[in-house]
Amino acid sequence: MAVAKPAVVGIDLGASESYVAYVGKGIVDIVQNEVSKRNTSTLVGFTDRERLLGDAALAQIRSNAKNTCRNFKHLLGRKVDAPDLEIEKFWSTSPLVQCDDGFAGYGVTYKGESRDMSATQVTAMYLTKL
């Protein structure tokens, strides 16, 4: 019976790009995504039909900016009325709202329905991509 070697995986969740790497055979290797890029755009977009993650969200950001969430790591665990979130309101393509949990999130339209998505929810959606 073969013994499985333990693996170490790291995720760099950046404001604009994210990376996944692992240690194998004593070296760090950065994982390529489905379009053979080592970085993945840190974006989540919502349309009338689907949820778009990463490069798919980047491809539609011009036509669907108000339903595209970016810089969501800056909102994690933050109240929407925090003074330093004013700069995030300026850079955010979708409106920042206070979600049911009391923290900051995004007001988007997904499948024809207005929804408030918390930064935690958006981050979890994005992590399924990586």
Image (tube, helix red, strand yellow):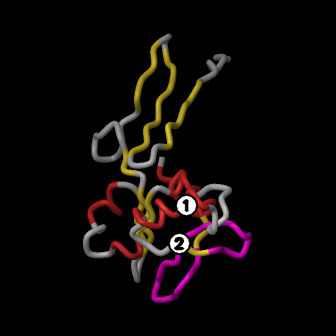
- Residue 7 x, y percent position in the rendering: 59, 24
Q: Kindly state the secondary structure of the residue where label 1 is placed.
A: helix
Residue 80: percent from the left, percent from the top? 62, 68
Q: What's the residue type where badge 1 is placed?
A: Leu
Query: Going by the picture, which residue comes out furthest to the bottom?
Result: 112
Q: Which residues are magenta?
A: 98-116
Residue 42 in the image: above or below residue 109: above
Residue 111 lies in the magenta stretch:
yes
- Which residue occupies the foreground of this view, 98 or 4? 98
Residue 49 at x, y percent in the picture:
40, 80
Q: Quadrant of residue 115?
A: bottom right
In reply to whether residue 36 is colored magenta, the answer given is no
**Which circle's residue, 1 or 2, is located before the other in the chain?**
1
Residue occupied by mark 1: 85
- Circle on res. 67: none
* Residue ID at (61%, 63%): 121
Which residue is most to the top?
26
In front of the other: 72 or 86: 86
Residue wearing tag 2: 96
Identify the residue at horizontal 72%, vertical 70% (top origin): 102
Residues at circles 1 and 2 in contact by the CB criterion of under 8 Å: yes
Q: Residue at x 38, y 76 (%)?
A: 66
Residues packed near mark 2 inside 10 Å, few (<14), some (14 to 19) or many (20 plus): many
Hey, what amino acid is under mark 2?
Leu
Q: Nearer the viewer, residue 62 or 127?
A: 62
**Residue 116 drawn at (x, y percent):** 58, 77
Q: Residue at x 67, y 64 (%)?
A: 79
Which secondary structure dominates the residues rendered in magenta?
strand
